[in-house]
């Protein structure tokens, strides 16, 4: 599949804009703060219905405007796929091929996108929340039921924590939240465990390719609750831990364990590179994880995802740049950059270049 065009209205610093894209490579150039990342953000919301930069939809509305609208046309399975998203202070409205919906979950399994930005290069060394978001974002695309379970878990966790903060905690209400937290938390744990096991196999192979066989990654799911094989077993141990940690949770007034506390351990030669790896090892790991994410989407869905590279090439050395580009022959590629070298341009397949200035996009020339 590939994205054919995008139409923007009052989106960030774009007043009115329509851009048609090349099915292979699209290079978006321009000085900083002109709207390059804003354009990629408008593409990304076509896949999950939300931004990769903010949790507040209204931040995407242009300054002084009441609403913003983004419409896209893609080519998938031999036919056009049209998506429209309107965001206002009252909420969000979606249309898929003209049919209205108000749920982000209905967008899933339509357009698959992977974003790779300078922030993602820090995914290995940054706090566990970044690695949880990486896993959750991918699983939400692959399995809409995971999106439902994760949303439900977060709401229940919030309710349980609110109850723990009260002066007098009612045990009958707490037992209800415990039961639901264990149910949805166990589903999340089992899905994450399976996902990380698959990701481990793929990223191991990719990291060996990047380093010419010198290094290979090993990923481990660090769950705050021991993992079990079945949902019933997982829920049982979750409930046991909830009961045993009740006194501690009441003292701290929050839930001290669960999927919201989990992490991914990332090793090279038995060294935990989250804490002890070199910058080169950490960047190789981040690149391997992103390329593994693409491969996993292809294997699980049979679809080629769209890759958004947001000003990330300048952060990679020439060797990693070339490995990345040569690994992406099958996917539609969007690259934002202040400038692109002649060497890199010559390594790219056919495509189109664009220039962005003050929220206006100019179609330049073919690669």
Image (spheres, rainbow, N blue to C red):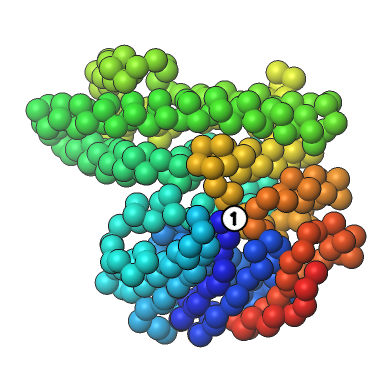
Q: Residue visible at 49% across and 69% down?
A: 73
* Residue at x 73% of width, y 51% of height: 329
Tell me if residue 87 can be seen. no
Horizontally, is 196 left or right of 92 in the view? right
Dot 1 crowding, Cα within 10 Å, few <14, some 14–19, many 20+: many
Q: In this view, does 86 lie to the left or right of 138?
A: left
Residue furthest front as drawn: 78
- Name the image quarter holding residue 319: top right
Q: Where is residue 144 in the image (x, y as percent from the top left)?
A: 37, 44
On screen, 14 above or below 302? Answer: below
| Coordinates of residue 328 in the picture (x, y in percent) | 71, 49
Say which residue appears at 41% left-offset and 77% top-offset. 68
> How many discs mark residues in the rendered view?
1
Secondary structure at badge 1 equals strand
Give the quarter of the image for residue 309.
bottom right
Picture coordinates of residue 225, whole percent (x, y): 40, 20
Give residue 85's quadrant in the image. Answer: bottom left
Q: Is residue 294 above or below residue 60?
A: above
Residue drawn where x is 80% and y is 69% of the image? 367
Q: Nearer the viewer, residue 97 or 323?
A: 97
Q: In which quarter of the image is the N terminus?
A: bottom right
User: For mark 1, what is the residue?
Assistant: 306
Q: Is residue 10 visible?
A: yes
Identify which residue, 275 or 37, lies in the foreground.
37
Q: Is residue 75 above or below residue 32?
A: above
Left of 222 or right of it: where is 31?
right
């Amino acid at each position: 599949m590939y994205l054919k065009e995008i139409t923007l209205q009052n989106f960030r610093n774009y007043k009115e804009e329509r851009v048609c894209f090349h099915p292979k490579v699209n290079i978006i150039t321009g000085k900083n703060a002109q709207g390059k990342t804003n354009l990629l953000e408008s593409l990304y919301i076509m896949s999950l219905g939300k931004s990769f930069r903010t949790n507040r939809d209204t931040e995407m509305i242009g300054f002084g405007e009441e609403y913003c609208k983004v419409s896209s046309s893609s080519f998938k399975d031999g036919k056009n796929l049209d998506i429209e998203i309107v965001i206002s202070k009252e909420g969000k409205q979606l249309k898929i091929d003209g049919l209205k919906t108000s749920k982000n979950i209905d967008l899933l399994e339509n357009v698959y996108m992977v974003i790779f930005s300078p922030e993602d290069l820090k995914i290995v060394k940054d706090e566990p929340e970044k690695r949880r978001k990486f896993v959750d974002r991918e699983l939400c695309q692959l399995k809409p039921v995971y999106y439902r379970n994760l949303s439900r878990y977060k709401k229940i966790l919030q309710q349980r924590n609110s109850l723990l903060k009260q002066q007098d905690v009612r045990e009958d209400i707490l037992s209800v939240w415990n039961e639901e937290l264990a149910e949805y938390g166990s589903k999340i744990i089992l899905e994450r465990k399976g996902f990380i096991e698959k990701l481990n196999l793929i990223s191991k192979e990719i990291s060996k390719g990047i380093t010419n066989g010198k290094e290979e990654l090993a990923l481990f799911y660090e769950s705050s609750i021991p993992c079990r094989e079945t949902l019933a077993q997982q829920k049982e141990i979750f409930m046991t831990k909830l009961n045993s940690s009740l006194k501690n949770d009441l003292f701290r007034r929050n839930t001290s364990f669960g999927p919201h506390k989990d992490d991914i351990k990332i090793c090279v030669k038995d060294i935990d590179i989250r804490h002890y790896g070199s910058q080169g090892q950490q960047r190789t790991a981040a690149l391997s994880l992103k390329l593994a994410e693409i491969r996993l989407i292809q294997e699980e869905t049979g679809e080629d995802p769209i890759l958004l590279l947001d000003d990330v090439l300048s952060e990679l050395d020439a060797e990693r740049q070339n490995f990345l580009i040569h690994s992406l022959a099958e996917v539609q590629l969007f690259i934002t950059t202040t400038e692109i070298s002649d060497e890199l341009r010559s390594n790219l397949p056919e495509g189109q270049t664009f220039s962005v200035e003050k929220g206006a996009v100019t179609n330049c020339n073919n690669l």
